[in-house]
Amino acid sequence: MQRTETFVRPRFGYIVGDLPSPRFGVAFGAAGVAVVLAAVLVSRYGVRQGILFALGLLLGITLYHARFGFTSAFRQFVAVGQGAGLRAHMLMLAVASVLFAPILASGKGLFGVHVAGSLAPVGLAVLVGAFLFGVGMQLGGACASGTLFSVGGGQTATLFTLAGFIVGSVLGAWHWGFWTQPALNLPALSLATVFGGYFGALIVQLGVIGAITLVTILIERKRRPPQIAPQPSARGLARVIRGTWPLWTGAVVLAVLNAATLLVSGHPWGITSAFALWGSKLAQALGVNVSSWAYWSGSRAASLRASVLADVTSVMDFGIVLGAMIAAALSGTFVLHRHLPPKTVIASLLGGVLMGYGARLAYGCNIGAYFSGVASFSLHGWIWAIAALLGTTVGVRLRPLFGLTVPKQTDAVC
């Protein structure tokens, strides 16, 4: 029988929960793979690629320890008006905006790279894609970042979500030419262009973030939702590697790591373009002429020919999975689930397909379009958030059909 350790949160004076003993075998195994992969990346592709992999590891550790959810935050707000998760998003976006503004204004990063934000056209593609993504993440049980850190944490159901994500991404790449035609979309628009530079855009954006934060507080006071369930956590410095971090800590660390990604890679953090690459490479190996698709023309054509280890997004995704696995193992919460209800498997696959397809249409997911898009002062990032929230309202209504729970006003916690 596995030993557990009970910890108390001193500030509130009650037992938060039991932490299982660390899974050192899993932690050392994941760390070993990470070391070998880092050595291969540095030797073949240079120090810059190794640093990006390290940033992926740190992102995975942060996402897992903070349990930083986009799916749960949207669902809790739509279902019962609990806005703590969205306020954490706003803190993350505010810090990232402050960090991104001077970097984007200078146009210069490390290793001599030119930096550019995540700007994308505004139109039907973003509206439909983000809406589908919002529906999909409620069925799949995780967003793009959540899928990766959950896979690393041993959540077997999200393997099906990831599989669906890859399939949907390939379908989205196949249909890319239709959805991105100029007749259906307007050009990309940066708030820095509208408000006379990044300083003006930053002031306006912080004002919008503050207004959203205030709205979530007012809605909470009116609806009086259940509180977010506390998670097991250690005390003091042990909390860094044992248990759950506060949401605000995760928000700040993620913002800093995204800014570091911008400086090192030349563009902000993204996730789902790698899924389209992996799936398209597999389809190509099976005889599908994916190189004829509009999505794989131009600058993307080289990625299709090169190794996935040369792709920045793929390398960071691998780092997220391994980082989350190390964090879960040291927390003692890495557990593989062997028995899954058929409805859960179906929902995971369907949700993944919707998210993969939606992410390609919307020029990104909750990270590439929402987090990095807003932090880059792109109007499409804010439109993505609105459309995904609308999609969430549909996804929340569909969850019970697959045996998935939805927070209720009468719940003790959500």
Image: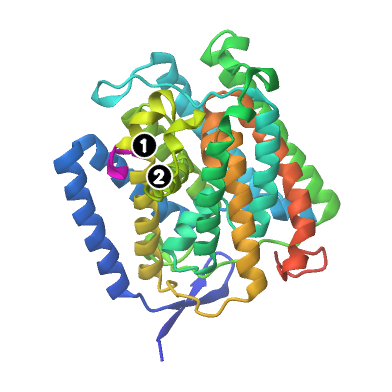
Helix, strand or loop status at disc 1: helix
User: Which quarter of the rendering shows the C terminus?
Assistant: bottom right
Q: Residues within 10 Å of mark 1 (few under 14, many from 20)?
A: many
Q: Residue at point 55% right, 30% down? A: 373
Q: Are marks 2 and 1 in contact (CB under 8 Å)?
A: yes
Residue 304: numbered disc: 1
Residue nearer the viewer, 381 or 168: 168
The picture quadrant where one finds residue 228 is: bottom right
The answer to whether residue 250 is above or below residue 99 is below
Q: CA distance from mark 2 to mark 1?
A: 9 Å
User: Which quarter of the rendering shows the N terminus?
Assistant: bottom left
131 relative to 6 in the view: left or right: right
Of the numbered discs 2 and 1, the one sitting upstream in the chain is 2
Q: Residue at point 59% right, 60% down? A: 349
Amino acid, disc 1: Leu
Residue 221 in picture, x, y percent from top left = 81, 50
User: Is residue 81 in view?
Assistant: no
Q: Nearer the viewer, mark 2 or mark 1?
A: 2
Q: Is residue 65 magenta?
A: no
387 relative to 300 in the view: left or right: right
Residue nearer the viewer, 9 or 125: 125
Q: Is residue 308 magenta?
A: yes
Residue 109 in picture, x, y percent from top left = 32, 23
Residue with the mark numbered 2: 284
The answer to whether residue 197 is above or below residue 293 is above
Q: Residues within 10 Å of mark 2 (few under 14, many from 20)?
A: some
Residue nearer the viewer, 121 or 322: 121
| Span of residues in magenta | 306-312
Q: Residue at point 72% right, 67% down? A: 402
The picture quadrant where one finds residue 121 is: top right
303 relative to 345 in the view: left or right: left
User: Is residue 182 in view?
Assistant: yes
